[in-house]
Each structure stands twice: as structure tokens, then as C-alpha cells.
Image (cartoon, rainbow, N blue to C red):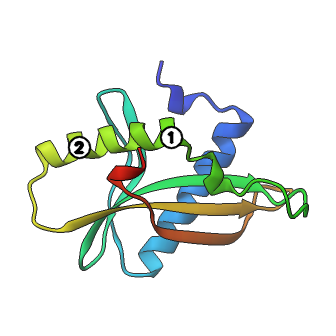
Amino acid sequence: MNILKVLTEKRIKGNIGEEAAAKYLKRLGYKILYRNYVADGHEIDIIAEDREHICFVEVKARGEGSKNPYSMRPSDAVDREKRKSIITAARAFFASNFGRKKYRFDVAEVYLDYKNKPTKINYLESAFTLNDR
């Protein structure tokens, strides 16, 4: 069974966040190459292209919930293990997709209201690099 098809509350929020991030990127002129790209058991939420870069985008969707200034940002969940996983999938992507563009690893923080409607997107370009593993 494909884990991405199991609709837990977390997966529902993730799907909503990924859709919102993809629409956001399209509005900014990015071309969406892949959604939920999987290679060697590792997944990248969105692979997009702008004029200069191939962008490997990790989407983190969270409810707005607490206004506590000490609460974690969604991007804080992109820990060392998650970065390693994304980098592994990105290397597999490059092995099968030749090109001369630069690349970067971005994170899209999608904030949802209590009805899981996206209210804000914070897009972090170059959120991490190959050396941040």
C-alpha cells in the first residue's frame, strides 16, 4: 500500500500544504516538474524549476494554533535525517535527469487555519545545502 494514500490527519494537512505550495510556486512563475518524487525509498514533495535553478522543495504544513513565540516553526521539522533523505532523492533525480542548471533545497512553510485552509506561506529559498547533512 502506498503510504501517501493513507489519509491520516497529518497526511490530509500535508496534501493541503503541498497543493498550496505548488499553486504558490506556479504564481511566481516556477514550473512544477514533479510532485511526491520518490527514489530509492526517499521522497521529495515538489521538484520545481525557475529560470536558474532546479528546486527541491520540502513542504511543512502546520495549524496556526499556538501564538507562543517559543513554538517550533514548520521548517524546524526538516531535521538532519530529513535533509539526508531529500539529498539522497535529489542525487537519484540528477542521475536520471541531465541538465546544466544550478539546484537548491527550499522549504515551504504552509500555515493552516482551524479548518485546514491555507492562510500563509513562508517560502525559504536555499533553506539547506548538501553540506548541512
Residue shown at 65% from the left, 32% from the top: 7
Q: How crowded is mark 1: few (under 14 residues within 10 Å), some or many (20 or more)?
A: few
Which mark's residue is nearer the viewer, 2 or 1? 1
Badge number at residue 91: 2
Residue furthest front as drawn? 131
Tell me what residue is drawn at x 82 percent, y 60 percent: 64
Dot 2 lies on which element? helix
Residue 40 got which mark? none
- Give the image quarter of residue 75: bottom right
Is 33 or 130 nearer to us in this picture?
130
Q: Which residue is drawn at 74% across and 37% down?
A: 9
Residue at the image point whose x is 55% and y is 62% from the top: 108
- Residue 67: % across, % down: 90, 64
Relative depth, front residue between 101 and 2: 101
Q: Name the residue under label 1.
A: 80
Q: Which amino acid does label 2 sit on?
A: Arg
Residue 56 is situated, as x and y percent measured from the top left of the image, at 37, 56
Marks 2,1: beta carbons within 8 A: no
Dot 1 lies on which element?
Answer: helix
Closer to the camera in the image, 122 or 119: 122
Q: Which residue lies furthest to the top in this view?
A: 1
Q: What residue type is labelled 1?
A: Arg
In this rendering, would 124 be left or right of 13?
A: left
- Give the Cα distance between marks 2 and 1: 16 Å
Q: Position of residue 15 (x, y in %)?
A: 59, 48
Is 51 placed above or below 1 here?
below
Quadrant position of residue 125: bottom left
Of pointers 2 and 1, the one earlier in the residue sequence: 1
Above-or-below relation of 12 to 129:
above
